[in-house]
Image (spheres, rainbow, N blue to C red):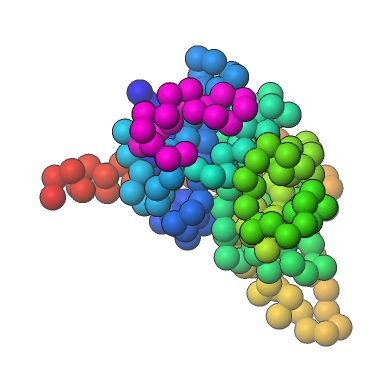
Amino acid sequence: MPLLQDLVIAYRILADHGIIDAYGHISVRSPTNPERFLMARSIAPELVTEADMMEFGMDSEPIDAKGFTPVTERYIHGEIYKSRPEVMAVVHNHSPSVIPFCCTHTSLKPIFHMSAFIGQGVPNWEIRDAREGTDMLVRDAHLGDSLAKKLGRHPAALMRGHGAVVVGESLAVAVGRSVYLEQNARLQFQAEMLKGPDGAITFLDDKEVAANVAWQEYGRFWNLVRTKMLKRLETEKLT
């Protein structure tokens, strides 16, 4: 199934870019049933294969567990798919350059054109608003729903002390946004250091955001990284 192959590739790409570590995960909405989504079992992203994929309903429970252990935070995905019918892919990551923006008063803003979507807003979800004393993981539908509500209609949301969730109208968009969210965070931090105490950073304005978001499907980026990863996977099979 081509979609399963692309989902495996997406896992590998984001791991390769350092966007997800041993605990990040990606899902896609089923092309045959919009009330279901596909995601790998609880396994490190770099080890994911098509055989590891599981199908879930909108309650985030497996249709057929197949003896696998599902990802604990699958409720992130289910609750977002329920609230955002146009979303076809969801990424939850622990992007290292993004995390400092989760726990400070510095907001992520679009610093270059490839990350223009940030100008549509990236709210910061505080898990304590939903429940105090958690281990920061989204372990049930109540927490997933709270995160989905904070995400709202935005392309991404930060998760205080945890990471981020990124959505897209396609797998390519969700992967592209995840990579460029990380790059923007790193560049914004560098600009902050360069500007000095009396300087300022020139971010994209609203018109520039709209003009760039209109064309950004990340097709060229996806084709490049997908092609590279396919070659690597083919090499792995030969060795």
Q: Residue 62 magenta-drawn?
A: yes
User: Can the viewer see residue 114?
Assistant: no
User: Does residue 45 appear to the left or right of 108 in the view shown?
Assistant: left
Please say whether residue 186 is visible from this viewpoint. yes
Q: Vertically, is 114 above or below 226?
A: below
- For the point 36% across and 29% down, the residue is 66
Q: Which residue is drawn at 42% across and 29% down?
A: 65
In depth, the one of 169 and 30 nearer the eye is 30
From which residue to which does the magenta span run?
Answer: 52-70
Of residue 126 and residue 151, the one placed in the foreground of this image is 126
- The structure residue drawn at horizontal position 26% and vertical position 44%, both measured from the top left corner, is 233
Q: In this view, does 61 lie above or below 206?
A: above
Identified at 42% across, 40% down, the residue is 69
Q: In which quarter of the image is residue 104?
A: bottom right
- The spot of residue 70 in percent (x, y) is 47, 39
Residue sitting nearer the eye, 193 or 30: 30
- Residue 115 in the image: state x and y as whole percent: 66, 52
Query: Is residue 46 rendered magenta in the image?
Result: no
Q: In the picture, residue 127 is in which quadrant?
A: bottom right
